[in-house]
Image: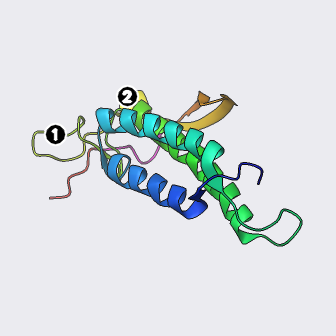
Amino acid sequence: MNIKGKQTVESFHKRLGKIMWEKCCMARNEQGLKEAIVEIQQLRKEFWSDVKIPGGINELNPELDKANRVADFMELGELMCIDALNRNESCGGHFREESQTEEGEAKRDDANYSYVAAWEYTGKSTWQLHKEELSFEVAKPTQRSYK
């Protein structure tokens, strides 16, 4: 509330959405993900120096609530890009352009990515990956074809 900037919360929300849509969508690549991480970090810095939140702090203020959610979305968006950059494979509906078969299908890498990931926030834009390996006893992962 004390920032008293010039840009609305909605403008930051839209800009974040554009970054995520263009660079961390269903089809993604290493360069775009790296660019998205930097752009989100810059956007977050701009947010904390130039956001305008109308209304007061001691009243029901939906804009303040929205500002808190958008601040969280920026951290989540950055983490989604970091996780997507870390997972250098195509899996499910998430297609890494660098990881495809000769026919253009998503190429899995189960030898290196058969784990559940949990990320721990350790400070300003730093995250630590924790992994829990998966074992498949009945149903085994297989390469899919959508043709």
Give yes or no for contact between labels 1 and 2 (Cβ–Cβ under 8 Å): no
Residue range of the region highlighted in magenta in the rendering? 135-142
* Residue type, label 2: Ala
The reply, left or right, for residue 120 in relation to residue 23 is: right
User: Does residue 129 show up?
Assistant: no
Residue receiving disc 1: 101
Of 134 and 62, nearer the camera is 62
The reply, left or right, for residue 2 in relation to residue 98 is: right
Residue 137: x percent and y percent? 48, 41
Query: From the viewer's perspective, is residue 32 above or below residue 131?
Result: below
> As drawn, which residue projects farthest toward the right?
58
Query: From the viewer's perspective, is residue 139 above or below residue 37?
Result: below
Is 63 contained in the magenta span? no
Residue 144: x percent and y percent? 25, 50
Q: Main secondary structure of the magenta part?
A: loop
What is the distance, in whole Å, between disc 1 and disc 2 at their CAs? 16 Å
Residue 48: x percent and y percent? 65, 44
Which marked residue is nearer to the observer: mark 1 or mark 2?
A: 1
Element at badge 1? loop
Of 80 and 49, nearer the camera is 49
User: Does residue 67 show up?
Assistant: yes
Please state, as top left, top right, bottom left or bottom right, where the C terminus lies in the image: bottom left
Give the label on residue 36, or none: none
* Residue type, label 1: Thr
Element at badge 2? helix
Give the label on residue 111, or none: 2
Residue visible at 26% across and 44% down? 143
Residue 22: x percent and y percent? 33, 51
